[in-house]
Image (cartoon, grey):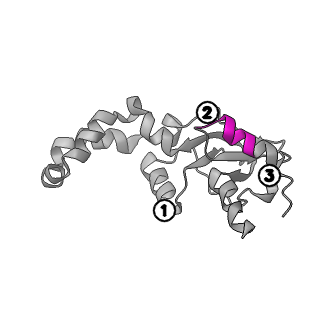
Amino acid sequence: MKLSTIKDVMTKQVISVSPETSIIEVQEILYKHKFDGAPVVDDNGKLIGIITEYDLLTKGSAIHLPTFQKILSQLPIFSKDRSKFEEEINVISSLKVKDIMNKEPFVLYEDASFKEVVRAFQEHHRVNPIPVINKEHKVIGIVSRFDVIKLFSRLK
């Protein structure tokens, strides 16, 4: 098995989101597809950011994580008296991807070698997935740690 470029391991069918996608919707996309993140593209398909599960969990100032934790810890109360939490729910529900996305994502170009892919994950521990772009900054693929790890199954 010869691996020479990123194209040998990247996922070519990319599901991306727009900056106007609600964070509720992006959470559903990530959960449904078991993704760690999704590229954010403009109307021309150019990469303008990335939204990851890390962003959803750590951008507490936008989501007000303590309030969200309180809601989760009181789910029995929440289901009985939703009105007590209505304001917090409305704030969270109104957030868009553009409010919490990483506007300067780490990227790899379409001609990156397989060694560069491995090195990127070694050197950038919190980066996952990595958008793969062409010279026009259009997303042509995405590579994740899972894409690299699944190569082990080919060794059998």
Picture quadrant of residue 91: top left
Q: Which residue is mark 1?
A: 32
Residue nearest the viewer, comparing 31 with 101: 31
Q: Nearer the viewer, mark 1 or mark 3?
A: 3
* Mark earlier in primary sequence (2, 1): 1
Q: Amino acid at mark 3?
A: Ile
Residue 109 showing in the rendered view: no
Quick check: marks 2 and 3 in contact, CB under 8 Å? no
Q: In x, y percent, where is residue 11?
A: 70, 59
**Label 2 vs label 1: CA separation?**
24 Å
Q: Amino acid at mark 2?
A: Lys
Point 23% across, 40% down: residue: 70
Quadrant for the C terminus in the image: bottom right
Range of the magenta residues? 118-125
* Mark earlier in primary sequence (2, 3): 3
Q: Residue furthest front?
A: 156
Residue 8 showing in the rendered view: yes
Q: Which residue is mark 3?
A: 6
Instruction: Say the numbered circle drawn on residue 77.
Output: none
Q: Nearer the viewer, mark 2 or mark 3?
A: 3
**Label 2 vs label 3: CA separation?**
23 Å
Point 67% across, 45% down: residue: 130
Q: Is residue 28 left or right of residue 3?
A: left
Q: Which residue is mark 2?
A: 103
